[in-house]
Image (cartoon, rainbow, N blue to C red):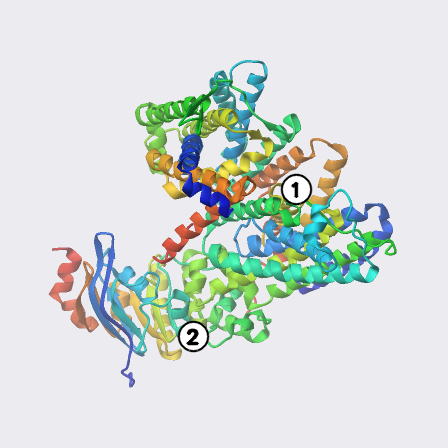
Amino acid sequence: MHDKKEKILTVKNAHKNFGGVVANKNISLEVIEGNITGLIGPNGSGKTTLFNSIVGYHPVDSGQIYFDNQEISAMTIDSIARLGLLRTFQQTRVYKKLNCVDNLIISISNKDTRFIDIFKPFKNKENIEKAHDLLEFVGLYSKRLLFAGELSFGQQKLLELVMALINEPRILLLDEPTAGINPTLINGLIERLKKINENYKITLFIIEHNMRVIMNVANDIYCMANGEIIAHDTPKAIQESQIVRDAYLGQ
Amino acid sequence: MDKKYTYIFLAFLFILSTVAPFIFPNYMVQMTELLILIILALTWNLIGGQMGYNSFGNIAFFGIGMYVTAVLQVGLFYDVGVYNAARGGGAELILSEMQYITGFATGLLLAGFIGALTALFLGLFILGMRGHYFAICTLGLGGMFGEIFAAWEWVGAGSGMTVPNPPASLEDTGSILYYLAFCIMLLTLLAMLYLNKTRFGLSLCAIRDDEDKAESMGIKTVYIKISAWMISAFFVALAGGVAGNLKKFIDPRDTAFTGETYGIWMILMVILGGKGYVWGAVIGAIIFQITKELFWTYLLGWQRVALGLLILIVIIFFPQGIMGTLRDKYPRLFGVYVDDSKK
Amino acid sequence: MLDNLIILFTVPTVSLQLLIDGIMIGAVLAIAAYGLALVWGVMNIINVTQGEYVMLGGFVAVIISSYGINPFFALPIAVLIVGLVGFLVYKTVIKRVLDKDIFTSLLATFGVSIVLQQLMNTYFGADVFVAQSNLGTLYFLNYEISLPIVKIVSLILTICIALALVYVLKYTRMGQAIRATAQNTRAAKILGIDTEKVYAFTYALNAAICGACGVLISMIYTIHAYQGLSYTLRSFTIVILAGLGNIGTVLLSSFGIATSETLAGFVLGAEFQIAFMFFVLICVLVWRNMHMRSKRLYLK
């Protein structure tokens, strides 16, 4: 299915402490380009901390993170994002006082633009068209002129997803995409995640608590517990793994 | 808002401002001040309204503009230190028409650039703060500049600096200043309307709504914040240059770096009009100036107390401002509605 | 400027004198700063009116001393009057902006400060006032160091006020309620603490101690209707340096701020003293912010 088997994201021996609390201990993992990789683990096992470290929200204490063979451990958040590594937030974050179209237009990729270009007219037909297409994709077209803050939580979540898409990332880190979404909408979301991966050629790295979702979409899954990676395998093997079960039930 | 409305408003404002001196020739100074207030409101709206960085310190650029213009008006033809030391007696500076115009023009231009450069330098250090730390820091900034200029002998220290008189041959300096302020106001307004259409304008709104998110989407927040402050400072300094010539005398604490008057008025005007709306700032400034002049006429002696109370009333009972309230009541007018039509 | 610096290093008595002055003023500033920290911690608003309450207290002392009464007796009166003003301000203004965003409350307190400032300006004019206590001066080291008795007395009074404050916060029922609200407002509400009352009391208490601070300042310094902002910002600088809460660190950092200010006033010239104070505020903020940025956080 995936012919390219190159590593797009590599974490090597990442350590992160908060005061005396060890949040991430010697984490090493790889995400293969074109795959959907899952990251599961009980609450407080350090998944979100790892995400935050990868995108530069707080640098790792020791260890390295490589994106496409380039070390990004010490880079700032916005420059990492411009390389094409993007994340969404667990607590959905959109620009609440802009309408949906503007939310998307401002998120259009600025990888290759010079700084002076931001002073050029930007709300042109082409960009608006692009935004409309993506809003159609998640079914928010009719609400495109509402302020993002006026949408429901689930709709904001979808909006945040397409905001990431319009930025044309190479890899997208999703922090619990189904949390807080109406269970009846989850199947639709699974379809959309698969579509994003196939049609837009975006590698996905997903933290998820809903096992049905992650087993359905992921090609391979990492499992974390107490700040360490305890297992890495295919969804099927993870489901049957005794270590993973112990971690969830608590030893 | 709709393009149609923008053009209508622009045309209306243009015509009104052009003919106003002929209709109200007795209120020239007040109308010039109104134009200056509109500039201040527009520039504060860019920083406080659109970017969400509530600066009390933009007044610093106002004062800087005032001083730079005045110093160049004098300094191109005379020794500034001597001029200021001899205040009150002697050294009356008599300029020719040509000298006055060149002095004023170079003064204004340089004021704008020095204002922007100051913003660049300060922004590097303090735009990393957020929320009320930024607000308090900028409050200190305005105060610091006021105190420095009040202690600086070369520019007249605490007793201020007199702006050189225009030559007698230039009869109607009142209307010259008015139309100058008008041009700068128009320039500012057009710049703000233009910026709203650019990626820059949208980025400002993004920074206001969620700066962390903007950063994680790859927006160069640091550069954008600094450029916004520089743009704001440039126009504020121009306004300051004109205001100095309007007042004819610069007192460091009472006219140039006045946190309690212009410094807070520019915020009040924007809140009154509606934070984040360019036209709100214009409307807020107009209403404010009329109210202020009424206070000055009918509440003499208590006008400043009344203005303080006005601030409180607006903040407590009308925090949304005119445009904000209108938007909540008539969202369709602002292009906010559910559109059920298929694509 | 260089001459002054040389004097400072070659004549130890001068620097000793400045140090003593700094400590005396610092002690008085500390209680205003502690009030700011209290209101900030409990109600999560930054009270820009702080300096105006100080001025108000000072003017009470000035009025009382103009009747020939020693201004020390103004202390309880000022505490009452300014506390009452604080209570009224809370009931009319602060209460309505508590749940709004922090900039609204900041602006509201700024508005109050303008109203108070202009009222004082209308009533007293823009002149400089001093409340004369006529207590004489002590001299040490062959008249090279002078120490007005009023400064010593005010230092002692400051310590008394601070101790009373600590007592109120630690051992009274209201003090415990205040501390509980500061830690977790919602939990305090659930446990039946009337937070509304706590807020009103805290704000009035803050105004009252600022009033006391003002009385002392009017005796050891001068009072001027437009001085408020500088006291607000001094308190703010001290609080930023010390952090919220601990009165010991507040005291220490206010000694530091006041001493550096008197030293700067001597070296740069008195006209630059207040400019220096603003500069220190900005530097402290920038320094704290850079410290945070190194951890990829920011001051907010």
- Left or right, C171 with respect to A229, comes to right
Q: Is residue B81 above or below residue A112?
A: above
Image x and y of residue C268, in percent:
51, 44
Classify 10 Å Cα crowding around label 2: few (below 14), some (14-19), many (20 and above): many
Mark 2: amino acid: Glu
**The residue marked by circle 2 belongs to what chain?**
A
Q: Is residue C289 above or below residue A194?
A: above
Quadrant hosting residue A71: bottom left
Which structural element holds mark 1?
A: helix
Image x and y of residue B269, in percent:
64, 47
| Rendered residue at 47%/73% (across/down) | A109
| Rendered residue at 74%/37% (across/down) | B296
Which structural element holds mark 2?
A: loop
Q: Which mark is residue A34?
A: none
User: Residue most toward the top?
Assistant: C68
Query: Taking the image as drawn, is residue A23 in sight?
Result: yes
In the rendered view of the protein, which quadrant contains the N terminus of chain B?
Answer: bottom right
- Left or right, A232 with respect to B90, comes to left
> In front here: A43 or C95?
C95
Classify 10 Å Cα crowding around label 1: few (below 14), some (14-19), many (20 and above): some
Image x and y of residue A30, in percent:
24, 74
Mark 1: amino acid: Asp
- Left or right, B93 with respect to A42, comes to right
Query: Taking the image as drawn, is residue C48 in sight?
Result: no
> In front here: B129 or C15?
C15
Quadrant hosting residue A42: bottom left
| Rendered residue at 55%/29% (across/down) | C222
Q: Which mark is residue B254?
A: 1
Q: Which mark is residue A168?
A: 2
